[in-house]
Amino acid sequence: MSLLIKTHLKLARISIKENRTRSFLTCLGIAIGVASIILILSLMGSISRLISDQVKNIGADLIVVRPASNKDAMTGIIGELTASNSYQRSNLAASDIETIKSIENVTAAAPIALSTHAVSTEKNTIGSVTVLGTNADFNLIQPLALRFGTFIGNNENVNKTAVVGHTLSLQLFNTTNPVGKTLTVMGERFIVMGVLSEVEESINFNNVDFDNVLILDIKNVEEISGMAQIQQINVKAANTDSLAEVSNTIREQLKEKKQGDSNFMVAYGDEITHPAGSLFTIVSGMLTLVATISLVVGGIGVMNIMLVSVAERTHEIGIRKAVGASGQNILLQFLFEALILSLLGGFMGLVLGYILAFFVSIVTPFAPYISLQILLVTFGTALLVGVIFGIYPALKAASKNPIESLKHYR
Amino acid sequence: MNDTVIELKGLTKRYGYGDTESFALKDFDLTVKRGEFIMIMGPSGCGKTTLLNIIGLLDRATSGEYKLNGENAANISAARQARLRAKKIGFIFQNFNLIEDLPIIENVALPLVYTQTPRVARLKQASSALSRFHLQEREYYLPSQLSGGQQQRVAIARAIVSDPEIILADEPTGNLDSRSSHIVMEELKAIHEEGNTIIMVTHNPALTTYATRVINMLDGQIDTDIKTVADHKLPKPVETRKKRKGRSR
């Protein structure tokens, strides 16, 4: 059998070489389909890796509590994405933080309450600045590099403290080091305690651009705007082993506190990126489906050219059968040719796809992501297309009547 | 050892049904012994080629019995029929039927591909078969680069390369001039003298001198059947073939 496979491979090579142009065009059909799948998968791969890297950077011992509705998963995701979290009425209150903090194995709990306010200094006024209301624990959970000064809440002598982002500092004070200076939010004066270092990645799971943020204590935020909308509570567990237990306790205690209303969600590990991850899965699934259509068109090209090849070589099929080829031999000969065509196309598509992904990565922050999985999926699909669209012409060749075929002249 | 290679009993091949019904073979009986060189003659359309195709397992009879080496052909699976064609039967056609894209050595080696012979061994066997017909210097020529007589000798080399028991020739000299015909017939004669069974269809009565038995067909039936050589004087096959096999391997 292996001998015959070798022969089939050789014959396929000869046949493809002899019809170089048409083989190339057929491969191109497959290549375009495969390239679009590669492009989509590699970009989606790089995006989801970007997201999961964020979580890894923060630490594996993080638990996140978010307000949630009791909708089903799919619409929930759409809802979470379309409704801006900042304007959503939050189900979490400042008192919940105390509840969480009192749970065993919780080392820190920090709220994230984002709002937008006008901020002014002696020199400048900026109409809309993202204000992050949190507490001192924030820096324990996700240590932010401070360029100057200290984080909020570290000086008990000063009540109203603030930390500004790198870019915001320049905009408000025209200097990188405004520590000790004051700024005004809603008529209240705050002393700048620290300045954040410039952040490289502007995307993170907190949805905060740390270069342009003003960090205040959540109590101060409540004072100036009446009430703080807590979008998220970040909880740090003592160790990774207690994550499940701690998150369960949080769930139970909060539910009890809210009289049985479970209008919040508790997540840890990969679940944190779940909404974003699911969206990308949906989008990439849809896009892959569209790309598959072009692959099917390519497959039809393979089938077409194989039918031509079978018709052209009817006489040869007759000769081969007369000297001892069985139907199976002929079937495999033509099936191999189709398989090699689509595998060649798959390989071309792989190269083409990565070149395209590379060009896309020039204009976007997404580096093309190569994984064994993607390679296997590509070659798997190419092989599948080869079999599906090659089997009919091969069956047609195998079922040819040798006597009729011998009469068929070129 | 059973000397009967082919046994046909009441063989009928019908084409069409009802008004369009016609018979290529009708109640055809024939027994072929090992070492016979049979020439089949007869007008066009009398069923000669159909007979060869059925004997060569390329076609099936509508009814009747065909026993090849005592085995009923109707009971042989398609896959085994193909294997038998590769190992036991050699075909020679009027129009040579070589694959134009393959060099002649690959053409000769073709039956060996389907008997799963390793590549080197099959090229070696093909090469020795070609040298027998004085074509060893043209092994890598394409068929179109050879004359008709040479092409037919390539085809004969292909027919004998796997040491078959039966060689079926359908007007092998039909497309050749008289000189090439003579060479081809001498080659067939030599093959026959090594003990091969040959069944050949021809229109040329002059060639019947090579045969040990001449059958005239008419309308799908035997008209005359003349044996020119007594059965016991037929060439003895077994030892000769074994000797030749030993040399080529």
Image (cartoon, coloured by chain):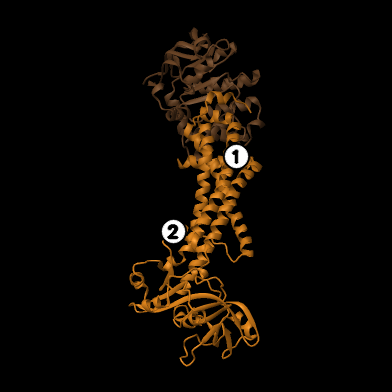
Chain colours: A orange, B brown
In the foreground, B195 or A334:
A334
Of marks 1 and 2, the one in the foreground? 2
Chain at numbered mark 1: A
Point 64% across, 28% down: residue: A410
Image: A205 above or below A343: below
Q: CA distance from mark 1 to mark 2?
A: 53 Å
User: Disc number at residue A73?
Assistant: 2
Point 63% across, 31% down: residue: B143
Q: N-terminal of the two: label 1 or label 2?
A: 1
A260 displayed left or right of B130: left
> Does dot 1 land on a helix, a strand or a loop?
helix
On the image, the x and y values in percent for residue B43 come to 57, 10
On the image, the x and y values in percent for residue A348 come to 60, 51
Point 34% across, 67% down: residue: A260
In the foreground, A193 or B115:
A193
The N terminus of chain A sits in image quarter: top left
- Count residues near mark 1 (Cα–Cα under 10 Å), then give few for <14, some for 14-19, many for 20+: some
The answer to whether residue B100 is visible is yes
Image: A78 above or below B193: below
For disc 1, the marked residue is A15
* Residue farthest along the bottom direction in this orientation: A157
> Does dot 2 land on a helix, a strand or a loop?
helix
Amino acid marked by disc 1: Ser
Q: Are marks 1 and 2 in contact (CB under 8 Å)?
A: no
- Count residues near mark 2 (Cα–Cα under 10 Å), then give few for <14, some for 14-19, many for 20+: few
In the foreground, B190 or A356:
A356
